[in-house]
Image (spheres, helix red, strand yellow):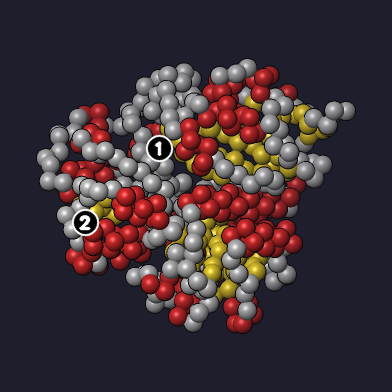
Amino acid sequence: MADLGLEPVCVQDGKAARTTLTNHDEAPAVVMTELSLAGVDGFQLVREVRRHSPDTRIIVLSSFVTLRTKALEQKDMLDIQGILAKSAPLESIRRMLYRVLGIQPPEPTASATQPTPLPMLAPLESPSPSPTPTASPVSASTPILARERTRLAQIASMQLVDEGPPDEVLQGLVQETARAFNVPIALVSLVLEDRQWFKAHVGLSGKVLEERGTEREVALCAHVVEADRAEPLVVPDAATHPVFSSNRLVREGLFRSYAGAPLITSEGTVLGTLCILDHKPLAISAEQVDGLVALARRVAGELEFRAQLSKSQQALKLERSAHAVVRLQADVLAAALNGLEDAVVLFDHQRIILFANESMALLADRNASELIGMERHTFIRLLSSRFKDSLDFLRRILIPEEGPYVAREDFELKSSQRVLRWMSRPVAFADGHFGQLTTYRDVTNEVELARRRS
């Protein structure tokens, strides 16, 4: 937008967008909006823009196929000029913007059409092509059926579905979630082949409680696992929503509003969601959605940690010194990690760094010895300065205060326009505690190729 001489105004949710539009005397030339928004959903926002600004160009984006399909059906009625998948290449978004504004786009350069091989972490200053927004853990070229088979196989291999009572720790987490968001219903929902099954739940009653789930076709959580890329789905008011108002569970009064954050494994597979539901419209902010994502990372971490405990051969062997500092028994493991181009750091269960390899020291611009013993929040503050948007980095790297977690996000480096993928997963220690193995991997080529294929 800035390249076209426009002044970009960015907001995080639908409510903030509505306030911004109201407070501006001049109608915007173009509005580009996600369809799944906190506060005010994207469809409602489009209607309000159209009522007050009939000449404004509107482009909508979404990772959810169902939402894009409904926008296409209502394109003429809502006077929408462009509809794109959120995983679309940046060049496609740029061309769409030119088209809806009636401007002739410049001819693409050779560098914009040919992928360029890139170095990894060292040196950080190496040049690279411009990255695109965060990519899906699964490439757009991966067949949907193959992705679904892999997803279901992972649920089976982790032995997550059982007939016993809800897991005590997970049950505590859904109760904490319901209290934190002041909603009557919170669920850990696993999306299976033909149904959603609740691993933990609070606030259910009747047939849904008795069956501990619903058929998949009415599960809003199914939209999260089927999305182009893993991200939360927010439906502030399903009763008035063009997609979900006809949902049987909405019509029967089980819920009226919904927000679900994906449960993502360390391999990038979406098992289901941590979701909240209410009987009234959901007044939730973008910051609260970030909090729900952090809690979902904790739930995914608990699921993965339990799967690790059942496979003791995968546990790292550690010992504690007299100062209660865990150190690696095998020096060869440290040597192997130091040889990786991925930046690697190992935290203990108290979020204190036990080990950092040389690539991580290079990324953090510190000696590895300086990082050992550092608390995570101090380390993250230090690391944030290396990324293009440090505030966005700090917002999206949010994790729960305690317990294991799983996380996966992409960030652009400040110095070189390369994209690093942050990945973290719990590891089981021999003494029964857990740690967190975190890596930062250069995925610029992968992101570029995925975008071009999409």
Q: Residue at x 57, y 43 (%)?
A: 398
Mark 2 or mark 1: whose residue is earlier in sequence = 2
Determine which residue is flagged by label 1. Answer: 446
**Under tag 1, what secondary structure?**
helix
Query: Could you say which quadrant of the image residue 52 lies in?
Result: bottom left
Q: Nearer the viewer, residue 63 or 181?
A: 181
Q: Residue at x 77, y 36 (%)?
A: 317
Q: Nearer the viewer, mark 2 or mark 1?
A: 2
Q: Is residue 323 above or below residue 59?
A: above
Q: CA distance from mark 2 to mark 1?
A: 40 Å
Amino acid tagged 1? Glu
Q: Is residue 303 above or below residue 418?
A: below
Q: Residues within 10 Å of mark 2 (few under 14, many from 20)?
A: some
Q: Marks 2 and 1: CB-CB under 8 Å? A: no
The quadrant of the picture occupied by the N terminus is top left
The secondary structure type at the circle numbered 2 is loop
Q: Position of residue 164 (x, y in %)?
A: 73, 70
Give the residue pinned by disc 2: 53
State the image coordinates of residue 231 (x, y, percent, origin top left): 46, 52
Q: Return the x and y of residue 212 as percentages of the image width and height.
A: 62, 74
Mark 1: give few (<14), some (14-19) or many (20+) Cα within 10 Å: some
Q: Residue at x 43, y 30 (%)?
A: 388
Q: Residue 75's quadrant in the figure?
A: bottom left
- Which residue is at the front of the view, 288 or 364? 288
Residue 70 disc label: none
When the figure is inspected, residue 302 is found, relative to residue 281, above or below; the finding is above
Side of 175 relative to 122 (left or right)? right
